[in-house]
Image (tube, rainbow, N blue to C red):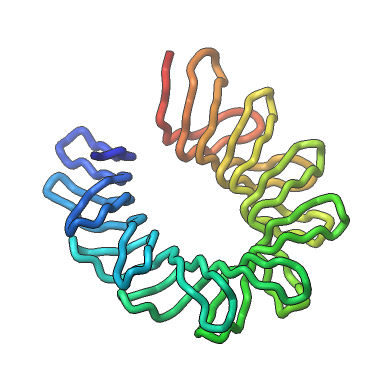
């Protein structure tokens, strides 16, 4: 079953960049696959696999149906008393380096972290729930040493000009500076944009690089776009899944 983003040249050479459900060795792959008309070349997959009884939901880079390097979201137990790790793990079916989402508490604040740990825990690159003003809640990627310093936020509910931003990556100093948003609900000309990557400032929206955009610039034509480069004056380029009525 293929649900593909397809780049077609209409000359016989068709390149597929797909979400593919395949099964090579009894393991179910939900993949982003680069395939050709002759066969599968490379998989960049979300894979549910079990090597040692641990369930892996992986981003897997495989060069064949057997698989090699795993860059996984893995549910593993702790080595140091921290109850549970939800990790991005580079594993070879035995588990080596852990780049984890870890629930840890250093100063009474709950950290849901990306942690580079060697069964002892060292550097924390965290998702942190903070509130600098008592109003805005930040769900951040935080480089912390049990005291908290730089905040690089993943999901931030911010309002600079009355527009609500739900940002993935935000460089903020408790006052808001520059937003690089993943999901942003904005409206420049009455059109609702649900953007994946948006470069905005506190004075207004500058440029959109949208993942999913519902656009109706010229009338009844509805665009459900994967990658759209738009400005506040209109739509410039589309690489879309287009629903035309």
The image shows residue 70, relative to residue 35, as above or below, that is below
Residue 214 appears left or right of 158: left
Residue 198 place in picture, x, y as percent: 62, 45
Q: Tell me which residue sits at (78%, 75%) in the image.
A: 107
Identify the residue at the far right of this view: 133
Residue 76 appears left or right of 37: right
The front one of 69 and 98 is 98
Occupied quadrant, residue 4: top left
Residue 82 place in picture, x, y as percent: 59, 76
Q: Quadrant of the N terminus?
A: top left
Residue 79 place in picture, x, y as percent: 51, 82
Identify the residue at the far left of this view: 38
The image shows residue 39, relative to residue 9, as above or below, that is below
Q: Tell me which residue sits at (40%, 81%) in the image.
A: 96
The front one of 159 and 112 is 112
The front one of 183 and 98 is 98
Q: Tell me which residue sits at (73%, 47%) in the image.
A: 157
Residue 106 appears left or right of 222: right
Q: Tell me which residue sits at (49%, 21%) in the image.
A: 222
Total numbered badges shown on the rendered structure: 0
The front one of 216 and 51 is 51
The image shows residue 55, relative to residue 14, as above or below, that is below
Residue 15 place in picture, x, y as percent: 24, 44
Occupied quadrant, residue 72: bottom left
The image shows residue 86, relative to residue 206, as above or below, that is below
Q: Quadrant of the C terminus?
A: top left
């Amino acid at each position: 079953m293929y649900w593909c983003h397809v780049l077609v040249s209409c000359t016989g050479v068709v390149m597929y960049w797909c979400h593919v459900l395949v099964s090579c060795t009894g393991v179910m792959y939900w993949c982003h696959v680069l395939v050709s008309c002759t066969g599968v070349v490379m998989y960049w997959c979300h894979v549910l696999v079990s090597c040692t009884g641990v369930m892996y939901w992986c981003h897997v880079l495989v060069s064949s149906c057997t698989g090699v390097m795993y860059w996984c979201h893995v549910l593993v137990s702790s080595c140091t008393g921290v109850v549970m790790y939800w990790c991005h793990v580079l594993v070879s079916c035995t588990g080596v380096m852990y780049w984890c989402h870890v629930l840890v508490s250093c100063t009474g604040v709950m950290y849901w972290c990306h942690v580079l740990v060697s069964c002892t825990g060292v550097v924390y690159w965290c998702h942190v729930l903070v509130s600098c003003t008592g109003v805005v809640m930040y769900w951040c990627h935080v480089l912390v040493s049990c005291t908290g310093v730089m905040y690089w936020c993943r999901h931030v509910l911010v309002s600079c000009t009355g527009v609500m931003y739900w940002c993935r990556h935000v460089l903020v100093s408790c006052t808001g500076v520059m937003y690089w948003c993943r999901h942003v609900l904005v409206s420049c000309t009455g059109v609702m944009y649900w953007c994946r990557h948006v470069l905005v400032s506190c004075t207004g929206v500058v440029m959109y690089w949208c993942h999913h955009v519902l656009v109706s610039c010229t009338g009844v034509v509805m665009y459900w776009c994967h990658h759209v480069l738009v400005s506040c004056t209109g739509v410039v380029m589309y690489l879309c899944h287009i629903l035309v009525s």
